[in-house]
Image (cartoon, grey):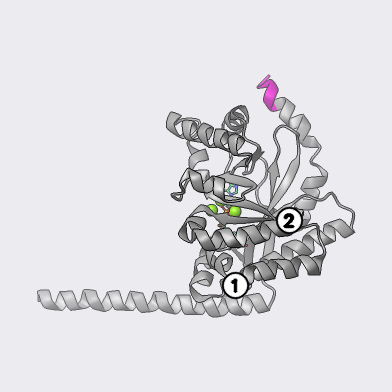
């Protein structure tokens, strides 16, 4: 009897595994076709300079329009990474972001630097540097308008390779940003060694900043470190006015999060940038506090 039950459990386990493998295979096929059919889209999330007033950066975040659903990156980037499709996704994103910058420049729009996320696998690929060079040439944009975000864990995983890639990208004039800072295990001496222009405090730290003194202390320390090393500090996932106020008082250079703006489709993003002068008014209201 017990044996039978055991077998049933194994059966349903294998069945579940098969189903999940099938789902992944299906997802991979769909994604491959989706890339070919132009189903990927970029959203742009504005980053605020709380001291100067207004957007000084945009982060490009990929979405997959699958039927009538917008699939978020966390649902397909891991599969793309496992299957190698990420090379195509990242190449598409890089190209799309640079073409968008070119379009803004050609239309004489205000030029705000755009950050692009590259996955670890893509970044370790020797082809990465060549791809960036090629895309910059094609779009003929100012290299300083392009910022490349890599995660802390990626950099630490293969430090030598990462440093080589970064040095080459810096030599082209591209800016570099360390994403999700605080979630990996970088030693501080590494920070000094790598040519980062900015460092993004992971949203898990920002979340508790107003009710956890230890998180607050960590954030103050990171901001202090940034000042010492001459690296701009960005806080991501800023959702509330309390978080915003804390970060500004602590001297954070850039604010990104729903508090300022969610990621927006390109048309809405352009509209946002045009209305951005309104930020000065909103800021004054926040600073003056509730009436
Ligand atoms: P990330 O680079 O750390 O991007 C920030 C994520 O936080 C985005 O999620 C953004 O929508 C979300 N976010 C922004 N403001 C807030 C906020 O106030 N509160 C909260 N809770 N979340 C906020 P998204 O767009 O779902 O992207 C998730 C991750 O997927 C990104 O994390 C990045 O690692 C990856 N990703 C996104 N686009 C690309 C891409 O084009 N290529 C690669 N390789 N990875 C990408
Ligand atoms: Mg990012
Ligand atoms: Mg991040
Ligand atoms: Mg992240």
Residue indicated by mark 2: 173
Give the left or right position of residue 220, taking residue 171 as reference.
left
| Quarter of the image where the N terminus is located | bottom left
**Residue 69 image label:** none
Sequence order check, earlier mark of 1 and 2: 1
User: Mark 2 falls on what kind of element?
Assistant: loop
Please, what secondary structure does the residue beneath circle 1 have? helix
Q: Is residue 24 within the magenta segment?
A: no
Mark 1: C-beta under 8 Å from nearest atom of ligand 1: no
Which stretch is magenta? 286-291
Which residue is nearer to you in this view: 122 or 19? 122
Vertical placement of residue 217 versus 158, above or below: above
At 54% across and 46% down in the image, what residue appears?
Answer: 191
Q: How many marks?
A: 2
Task: Give coordinates of residue 212: x percent, y percent.
Answer: 44, 31
Q: Position of residue 43 (x, y in %)?
A: 68, 57
Q: Is 95 on the left or on the right of 232, as rendered?
A: right
138 is higher (above) or lower (below) than 266: below
Q: Position of residue 20 (x, y in %)?
A: 40, 74
Front residue of 232/56: it is 232
* 53 lies left or right of 162: right
Judge the density around disc 1: few (<14), some (14-19), many (≥20) Cα neighbours within 10 Å. many
Q: Which residue is mark 1?
A: 87
Q: Quadrant of residue 16?
A: bottom left
């Amino acid at each position: 009897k017990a044996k039978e039950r055991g077998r049933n459990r194994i059966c349903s386990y294998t069945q579940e595994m098969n189903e999940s493998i099938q789902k992944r295979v299906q997802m991979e096929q769909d994604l491959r076709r989706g890339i070919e059919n132009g189903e990927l889209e970029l959203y742009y999330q504005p980053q605020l300079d709380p001291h100067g007033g207004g957007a000084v950066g945009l982060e490009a975040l990929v979405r997959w329009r699958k039927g009538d659903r917008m699939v978020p990156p966390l649902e397909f980037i891991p599969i793309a990474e496992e299957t190698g499709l990420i090379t195509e996704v990242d190449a598409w994103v890089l190209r799309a972001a640079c073409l968008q910058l070119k379009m803004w420049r050609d239309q004489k729009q205000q030029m705000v630097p755009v950050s692009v996320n590259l996955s670890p696998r893509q970044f370790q690929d020797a082809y990465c540097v060549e791809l960036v060079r090629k895309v910059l040439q094609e779009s003929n944009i100012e290299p300083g308008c392009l910022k490349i975000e890599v995660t802390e864990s990626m950099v630490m995983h293969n430090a030598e390779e990462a440093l080589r890639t970064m040095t080459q990208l810096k030599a082209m004039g591209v800016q570099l940003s360390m994403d999700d800072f605080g979630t990996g295990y970088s030693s501080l001496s590494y920070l000094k060694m790598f040519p980062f222009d900015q460092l993004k405090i992971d949203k898990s730290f920002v979340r508790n900043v107003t009710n956890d003194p230890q998180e607050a202390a960590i954030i103050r320390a990171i901001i202090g470190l940034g000042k010492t090393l001459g690296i701009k500090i960005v806080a991501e996932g800023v959702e509330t006015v309390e978080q915003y106020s804390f970060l500004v008082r602590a001297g954070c250079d850039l604010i990104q999060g729903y508090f300022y703006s969610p990621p927006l489709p390109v048309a809405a993003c352009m509209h946002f940038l045009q209305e951005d002068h309104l930020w000065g008014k909103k800021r004054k209201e926040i600073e003056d506090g509730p009436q």
